[in-house]
């Protein structure tokens, strides 16, 4: 039997680490196969395996650092720190929250929540074009919009341009009410939502009226040169090869581009190849163009979203392995 003790600075810290109804500590116990209990401001960790006990201690130490930085100790953060401990990267946990990308209209600081998100933000700052590729819920678009707003408010760019391909994913545009703008607005709604949160609805409307913020379908980008702009192409997996090339060649002077997408959610017809997949291959060795690939560990939505992404990845890998094992029939 292995045992280790920790002393907290206050009962408030202890309560934050344990969580309501000991929810946080129950997650840690289950993850490492240990028993954790408290007496006063002391915590004792016991278990059969010394390595597991030490891992649980490292997890609590990392969460304590987050607590003192003012970060919430919630289920999402606890599970992410557990994954960092398993990877041996928990020492970097406090460097994530130290990066404030932007402050929302409500005064909420917007920060990366995972190492993958921190790397993504750093790449966008350092490069002219950045690809952010990964599953739903990894903050690809949200963080890109936050960085665009930060650059706009710092007068580093004069315009923010957000665009998406208006690809029909089961629904038909023709059946939607209104004119063309009304028909494509539902496809652009996630971009509007992010901008409303950063600017507030009234300020957003003023900037949009002046032309300093533009949210439009990808087709509206043709024939333009975009100078002094922060340009975000969202849902890029649904661009064709021709659309992607058209978009990338819109880049003007003193501009920055971010292209986001999830290659597992392509809604193009089977006859069309994704421009995002081709661009990732063609542009991978060009200086000034960076690629950041998120994993399920970077999902910052509900815990089940991470589990769903992981389950689909495992299912797809198993299917690919089965297809490769099938004997090839020879034609005579």
Image (tube, helix red, strand yellow):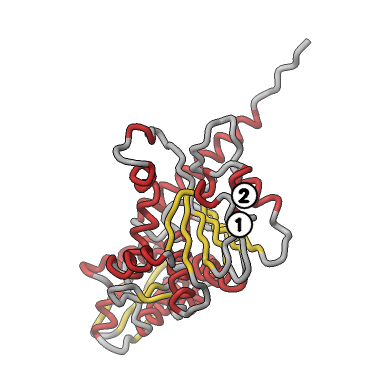
Q: Residue furthest right?
A: 332
In the rendered structure, are the residues bearing label 1 and label 2 in contact, judged by CB atoms less than 8 Å apart?
yes
Distance from disc 1 to disc 2, alpha carbons, whole Å, reads 7 Å
* The quarter of the displayed image where residue 62 is located: bottom left
Direction from residue 154 to residue 182 in the image, left or right:
left
* The quarter of the displayed image where residue 65 is located: bottom left
Whether residue 153 is visible to the viewer of this picture, yes or no, is yes
Describe the element under mark 2 as helix, strand or loop: helix
Quarter of the image for the N terminus: give it: bottom left
Mark identifier at residue 203? none
Mark identifier at residue 246? 2
Please state the horizontal and vertical placement of residue 57, each as a whole percent of the image.
42, 76
Residue 325 to residue 257: above or below: above
Direction from residue 262 to residue 42 in the image, left or right:
left
Direction from residue 230 to residue 3 in the image, left or right:
left
Which residue: 46% across, 49% down?
217
Q: Which residue is mark 1?
A: 250
Please state the horizontal and vertical placement of residue 254, each as a whole percent of the image.
60, 71
Query: Crowding near pointer 2: few (<14 within 10 Å), some, many (20+)?
Result: some
Please state the horizontal and vertical placement of residue 221, each as a whole percent of the image.
53, 52
Quarter of the image for the C terminus: give it: top right
Which residue: 43% across, 69% down?
146
Q: Residue furthest left?
A: 21
Query: Crowding near pointer 1: few (<14 within 10 Å), some, many (20+)?
Result: some
């Amino acid at each position: 039997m292995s045992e280790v003790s920790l002393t907290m600075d206050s009962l408030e810290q202890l309560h934050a680490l344990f969580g309501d109804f000991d929810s946080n500590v129950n997650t840690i116990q289950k993850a490492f196969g240990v028993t954790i209990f408290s007496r006063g401001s002391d915590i004792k960790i016991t278990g059969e395996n010394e390595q597991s006990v030490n891992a649980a201690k490292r997890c609590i130490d990392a969460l304590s650092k987050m607590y003192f930085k003012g970060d919430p100790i919630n289920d999402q953060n606890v599970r992410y720190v557990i994954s960092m401990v398993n990877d041996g990267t928990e020492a970097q946990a406090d460097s994530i929250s130290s990066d404030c990308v932007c402050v929302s209209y409500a005064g909420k600081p917007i920060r990366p929540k995972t190492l993958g998100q921190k790397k993504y933000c750093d790449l966008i700052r350092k490069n002219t074009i950045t690809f952010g590729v990964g599953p739903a819920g990894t903050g690809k678009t949200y963080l890109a919009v936050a960085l665009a707003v930060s650059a706009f408010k710092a007068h580093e760019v004069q315009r923010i341009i957000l665009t998406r391909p208006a690809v029909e994913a089961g629904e038909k545009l023709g059946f939607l009410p209104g004119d063309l703008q009304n028909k494509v607005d539902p496809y652009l709604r996630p971009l509007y939502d992010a901008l409303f949160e950063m600017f507030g609805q009234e300020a957003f409307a003023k900037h949009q009226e002046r032309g300093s913020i533009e949210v439009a379908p990808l087709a509206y980008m043709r024939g333009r040169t975009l100078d002094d702009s922060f340009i975000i192409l969202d849902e890029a997996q649904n661009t064709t090869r021709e659309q992607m090339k058209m978009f990338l060649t819109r880049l003007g002077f003193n501009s920055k581009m971010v292209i986001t997408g999830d290659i597992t959610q392509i809604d193009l017809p089977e006859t069309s190849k994704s421009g995002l997949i081709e661009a990732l291959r063609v542009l991978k060795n060009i200086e000034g163009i960076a690629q950041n690939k998120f994993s399920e560990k970077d999902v910052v939505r509900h815990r089940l979203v991470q589990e769903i992404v992981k389950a689909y990845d495992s299912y797809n890998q198993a299917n690919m392995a089965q297809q490769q094992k099938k004997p090839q029939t020879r034609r005579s």
